Amino acid sequence: MIEIGKVIPAMKPEYAIDMEAILKEHDYDTWAELKYDGYRFQLHKKGDVISAFTYNQNSIPLDTLPELNSSIKNLPDCILDCELNGGIGHSGFKKVKSRFRHRISNKRLEDYLISGIVDEMPMELKVFDTLYWEGIGLIEMPLRGRREYTEKIDEKKITPSRKWEVRSVEELQNIFDEVTGEKHEGLVCKDPRGIYIPDGRGNGWYKLKKFETLDLLILGAYINNDAVSQFLCGSYNDQTNKYESLGVVNAKREGIGEEAYGMIGSKFRKKRPRNVLTGEKITEPDFYLAPSDSLVLEVRAMNLNFSRNNKYMCGYDGNKSYSMRIAWAYGIRDTKKAKQSTTTKEIAKLYRLQEEK
């Protein structure tokens, strides 16, 4: 039973790359929604009682988002599934990250509000689903019906997500190219006949995103249920002649982990090679590989970070290092040698270009 003020576990989309498969599953009638690069935000309102929750079901202190107040007050009793948005692309995501607080004391809230950050980095809500509206629970209603309630919303700071009704791969590709060309994150394709499944993946929700493509060397492997589940991958530092860990990638897609294991599994070793660098707080792989015995993977990563992570050593400057956000193995580059993998200099350049977007 839906209860306002009690968080509904979020429905989660799956990652996808095959547009034809998505459209076929949706009977060539899919809704492509703009993927905003912000924080998932579930808003609850009943009279004057207002609350909000994160993707992980933690409370959000709405006092830190005063620019939303008047728009929220104009809403009827409702539960909205939204994205807290600070602008287009990665620069917008950084603003959301700067503004967001999980908790804040009264003193720090006062300092926060007078700092000017609210005016410098204003937030808005983009609503992509309505789960409850004026006494009606909607989660078992098909998306097509739920969207009719979402379209009723037209407040200054709270508006429906942008969407397209798509019936061909060509049309979907053109829309994807358009939005990523505008520096948006991508699209979420949804089956308009699907119901909302709390805490569920699938049911016709698929993320399409533009990823950075990197050629990274396998430095280690993680084993789960007697199979490779993840690879530790890294870049080549051509100044030090060492291989620097950049992150862990999903190896289960398209059987890539199994294929790679068949090629290099006999060369796995327990001890880390001296020319492979990892951070102090890394979760140790079950096995390492000597770079000369390893494989280069084509890796897709949503974006790159440069921060204090204490796990990876790519471009480590004594304080920060590079890492990947959401990465997976796309293919094996068996024609490339270890020193032909993406270099640390190239990672730094890609990060700079990303930050300029």
Image (cartoon, grey):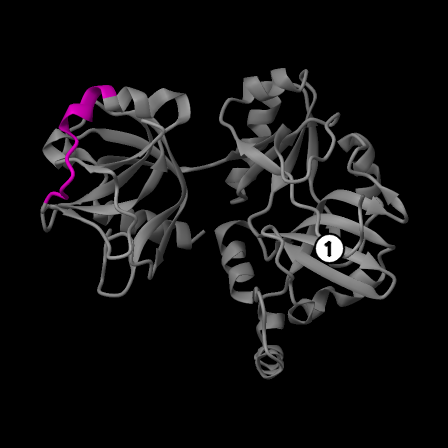
Callout 1 crowding tier (Cα within 10 Å): few <14, some 14–19, many ≥20: many
Queried whether the magenta region covers residue 269, the answer comes back as: yes
Query: In this orientation, does residue 156 appear?
Result: yes
- The vertical placement of 238 against 315, above or below, is above
Q: From this viewpoint, which residue is outermost toward the front?
A: 225
Residue at 56 percent across and 66 percent down: it is: 99
The x, y position of residue 55, in whole percent, is 60, 50
Dot 1: element: strand
Quarter where residue 104 is shown? bottom right
Residue at 31 percent across and 30 percent down: it is: 298
Q: Quick one: 265 or 202, which is closer to the camera?
A: 265
Q: From this viewpoint, which residue is outermost toward the right?
A: 135
The x, y position of residue 290, in whole percent, is 12, 36
- The vertical placement of 6 against 63, above or below, is above
- The vertical placement of 197 against 282, above or below, is above
Question: In what quadrant of the picture does the N terminus appear?
Answer: top right
Q: Amino acid at mark 1?
A: Leu
Queried whether the magenta region covers residue 117, the answer comes back as: no
Which residue is label 1 attached to?
Answer: 43
Residue at 77 percent across and 44 percent down: it is: 130
Residues shaded magenta: 262-273
The x, y position of residue 296, in whole percent, is 23, 30
The x, y position of residue 145, in whole percent, is 83, 33
Left or right: residue 240 compared with residue 21 = left
Left or right: residue 252 compared with residue 34 = left
Left or right: residue 129 compared with residue 202 = right
Left or right: residue 49 compared with residue 64 = right
Q: Give the total number of marks visible in the rendering.
A: 1
Query: In this orientation, does residue 151 appear?
Result: no
Q: Quick one: 315 or 312, which is closer to the camera?
A: 312
